[in-house]
Amino acid sequence: MIAPALRAYHDHPTAGHFSSKRTYYKMKFQYWWPDMYHSTEDYIKACLPCQQHNHNRKKRPGHLKPIPPPHGPFQVIGIDFCGPFSRTPNENRYVLCITDHFTRWVIAVALPDCKAETTAETIYNEYICKYGVPTTILSDQGNHFKNQLMDAMAILLGHHHIYSTTYHPQTNGMIERFNATFVPQLAKLQDTESNNWDSFLPSMVFAYNTGQHNTTGYSPFQLQYGQKPKLPPDEPPKQVIFAKPNDYYQQLKKNLKIYHEYARRNMVRQKERSKQRYDAKRPDPHYSVG
């Protein structure tokens, strides 16, 4: 009874996706259940259209507290959905994006839906089976992420799942910024008549992962693999050197150590600069006694 009532009084076109107070006020004359107001608030906090389109126009007091960057790859990843897009011939409408918070390496998977089962299976197959279990997964509070299945997977595999406000730039901002980047890029590539955007998705992600990132100073590919990528237009090498496995491993370790140290230093500097810019536009908070 509760879920259909919330959908009817919040999601329906005649309800207009208004605030918790408005939605509760309309429902309270027709329904009652324990802790009704707070469950209405929780439902609207997880409403994807509301979080995408609601903007706070007032600059809140208080200064930015940057989250320290991870110390290496495969520790913290952000996950988010983009869509729904126009359905492709392969029946895809959504894209699940996964971003490593250290390397900025992106995985983007075209999917037919954003159900909890699809989400958990994709994270397991496309990330965990290839890169291992991260320490922390950061996501918004959408129903596709905040559910019993995802909770059970976190317990089973041993990672922490931290939730932020959906599409809030100060929390899961890294993945949000990528989403804002890749949608127009994909639109430039796709054949609008065929609506085959999912066919161009791997190429677009490759282009992103092999480009230098402004914050780290390196490409995600370099921080992930310890070497520069060979791109299709690149000239083939004039000679091939076969290094001994141990020599190659030692050199790779050196490269990754140097890349990671400089990248983290650049990340810390960028966060400090962002904090200065953010704080300059925000008043100091004032608190009342009592």
Image (spheres, rainbow, N blue to C red):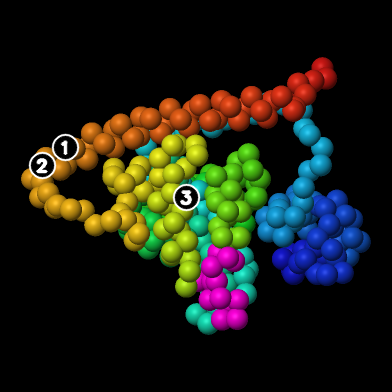
Crowd band around label 1 with a 10 angstrom C-alpha radius: few (<14), some (14–19), many (20+): few
Residue 112 location in percent, x, y?
53, 74
Q: Which mark is residue 207?
A: none
Helix, strand or loop at label 2? It is: helix
Q: Is residue 117 left or right of residue 34?
A: left
Stretch of the chain drawn in magenta: 186-198
Q: Amino acid at mark 3?
A: Thr
Q: Amino acid at mark 1?
A: Gln
Residue where numbered disc 1 is placed: 250
Residue 59 location in percent, x, y?
78, 34
Crowd band around label 2 with a 10 angstrom C-alpha radius: few (<14), some (14–19), many (20+): few
Helix, strand or loop at label 3? It is: strand
Indicate yes or no whether the magenta region holds residue 189.
yes
Q: Residue at x 49, y 37 (%)?
A: 215
Q: Which mark is residue 246?
A: 2
Quadrant showing the N terminus: bottom right
